[in-house]
Image (spheres, rainbow, N blue to C red):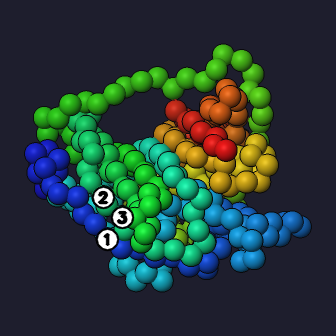
Amino acid sequence: MPIDLAAALAAPPTTKTISWTTRDVLLYHLSLGAGRGADPQLAWTFERDLQVLPTFAMVAGQGVSAGEPQPTALRLAGCDIDLRRILHAAQAVTVHRALPPVGEATVTTRVADLWDKGKAAVIVLEHRAVSDAGDPLWTTRMQIWARGEGGFGGEPGPSDVAAVPDREPDLMLERRTFADQALLYRLNGDLNPLHADPEFARSAGFAGPILHGLCSYGIVARALVEEVLDGDAARLGSLEVRFAGTLVPGETLRIRVWRDADLLHLLATCVERDDVPVLTHATARITG
């Protein structure tokens, strides 16, 4: 079904209540590689004094225990798109307070923008979460690239250039992924077969299953907390990236960090493929 721009932008926000438990948080951290190797990293992997990465907001209330059916399409007002046609293009999260390891929230979702790129459409979804007491928890903006869905008459949207400071990075970090990481990460709720089924991945134009972009996103968040923010997850106030390329499970993420007061400029690349970009247009804000 062609995209209906007016219907998508005029649709009222949807609202749902979500909840999560300590087990959901532990699974999320484990799926990012926490606890592998000799260091058990108890701040991420044990319920006593458990911290919660801000990027957990991406999966809160979406795990397999939530009973969500496996998706086969992206269905929104004015949009009905097969999963083979979509890619996660960009993600931003701002957390308004430290996330608790057990909680409940009301999440409001709306189509904030819809851009016409000619051969593709970009759908911008905004999610706002508040606690059961009415306190803001997080705000996210997600860009979805829908191949073959352009030409509906919308504005093309911004086209800024990825730029990092013109100097050597202040810090360079490496995090190696593992061969079964996508299979573990999908238990957080993203059951798109692109990350598990080789035949489906080939039908979508890939050589095989790829790692979730949000997994790379979470890996970067954990690396920043551990190496830049003295292990304090509450100091990571926001993280914004564009997904410029894919990562195959088992490959290594190289993260370049430039610090400018409380703003971090970031670039993440794939070590094994001559530093081909994976995450660009990336910034993180430090709080506290």
Please state if 281 lies on the left or on the right of 48 as rendered: left
Pinpoint residue 59: horizontal percent, then vertical percent: 49, 65
Front-most of residues 101 and 171: 101
Amino acid type, callout 2: Thr
**Image marks 1 and 3: residues in contact by CB distance under 8 Å:** yes
Tell me how far mark 1 sits from mark 2, CA to CA: 9 Å
Mark carried by residue 109: 2
Vertical side of 134 occupied by 264: above or below: above
Residue 274 locus on image (x, y percent)? 68, 34
Label 1 – label 3 distance at C-alpha:
5 Å
Q: Dot 2 surroundings within 10 Å: few (below 14), some, or many (20 or more)?
A: some
Q: Which residue is mark 3?
A: 107
Is residue 243 among what the camera can see? no
- Residue drawn at (47%, 80%) of the image: 64
Mark 1 or mark 3: whose residue is earlier in sequence: 1
Which residue is under mark 1? 16
Quadrant of residue 97 in the image?
bottom right
Question: Which residue is painted at 31% across and 61% down in the image?
Answer: 108
Q: Label 2 near label 3: C-beta < 8 Å?
A: yes
